[in-house]
Image: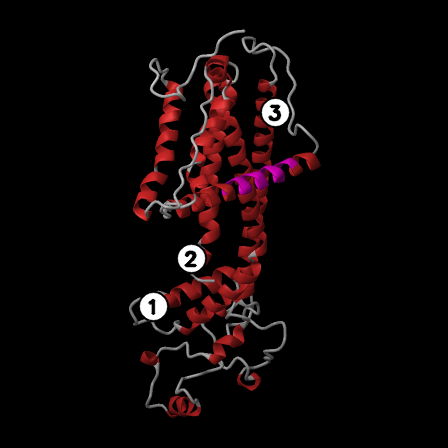
Amino acid sequence: MDNSESHFVPNSLILMGILSCAFNGFAGKICYDSLDPAKFAKWKPLLKPYLALCFFFNILIFFIALICFLMRGSLESTLAQGLKNGMKFYRDTDTPGRCFMKKTIDMLQIEFKCCGNNGFKDWFEIQWISNRYLDFSSKEVKDRIKSNVDGRYLVDGVPFSCCNPSSPRPCIQYQVTNNSAHYSYDYQTEELNLWRRGCREALLHYYSSMMSSMGAVVLLVWLFEMSVMVGLRLLHTSLESITNPEDPECESEGWILENSLKDTLKSALENLKKIGKFNQVEADAEGAEGEEGGKTPAITTDPQTAWAPLAGSKERQGGSSAFRARLHAPELPAAPALATVPAATQATLLSYPRLIATSFDQSLLVPQTKKRHSNELKPLTGN
């Protein structure tokens, strides 16, 4: 667990607390204004989005509560690594940035009544005495340093903070495992005047109990938020079914779910599917428009295809009942024979039908008063 992971739970709890205050304040304002129909009218459109936000917010609170109960494993490994590094830097009292480590470890062992990482023997594996306080002219010191592969001064001793002040015997912190060095002494007995419990176990118990308490509090907050959401849902539905909005004291029915839970979940899934299909159709339509926009219209050499717009105009004119009552549909002119016409002239002639179709569509909008040719629109005569 790195620094960011260790700060995730406390930062999340702080954020959830701030958001809870904001949500509950907003809910209180809505409940207060619900007594006045004029004031409640401005909050009515916001109730459904607010209830949806409350639902997702309660899910987040529930997951944060679960994390508080489930992070014991990562917490244990983090504490073990941190204590190991702290014990390694215990001797660096002259190194900037580490000079406080000795005091921190000593206060930790005294306050939590522990010694080492897993036990007092962990101090036997590291050099916790600074070279500044070693007499390198002493034969014993030289022999100990030479006997170690890494050139460290290792002793079977522990710092003074590992001593148990409740023991009637003076603290034995050097030659802890040498029974012959002390009178009437056996380090394997329960009368050992050192703390037997490791600091990892002590800290894990402390922080686990703290996280369990915090998880229980978060669960209580979650239950409270759920009750607030249910109350707002009942308020929303009861105000929706009110018969006389001007009378705030009239009776009305409220509900949490309009249908059964199964039907509600089924309808919610169907709505989600519809939203997904609608977004997919929009994306496909945009892609098709982009493809069509990149194409250039080709000039056809088929006369029947070229004169097709006039037929479409006739169908559109025939589909309007208002124009059918006033106008006769014109006869479509026959397609010219293009077999003996040059290619350049064919392209020019083939563009005429579309121009005629456009003019014909516009002629349906503006009544014509003058006859220009034999196929002019004629008014209908009543029988």
Residue type at mark 1: give it.
Arg
- Circle 1 — which element? loop
What separation in Å lies between label 2 and label 3 (alpha carbons)?
41 Å
- Quadrant of the drawing holding the C terminus: top right
| Residue at (63, 72) in percent of width and height | 190
User: Is 32 or 264 nearer to us in this picture?
Assistant: 264
User: Is 327 or 263 nearer to us in this picture?
Assistant: 327
Residue 136 visible, this angle: yes
Residue type at mark 3: give it.
Leu
Chain part drawn in magenta = 267-279
Tell me if mark 1 has few (under 14), some (14-19) or many (20+) residues whose alpha carbon lies within 10 angstroms of its own: some
Displayed quadrant of residue 270: top right
Horizontal and vertical percent position of residue 162? 49, 69
Horizontal and vertical percent position of residue 357? 39, 30
Residue 29 visible, this angle: no
User: Is 80 or 140 nearer to us in this picture?
Assistant: 80
Q: Kindly identify which residue carries mark 2.
A: 4
Q: Which of marks 3 and 1 is in front?
A: 3
Q: Kindly identify which residue carries mark 1.
A: 98
Q: Kindly identify which residue carries mark 3.
A: 234
Is residue 164 positioned above or below 313 on the image? Answer: below
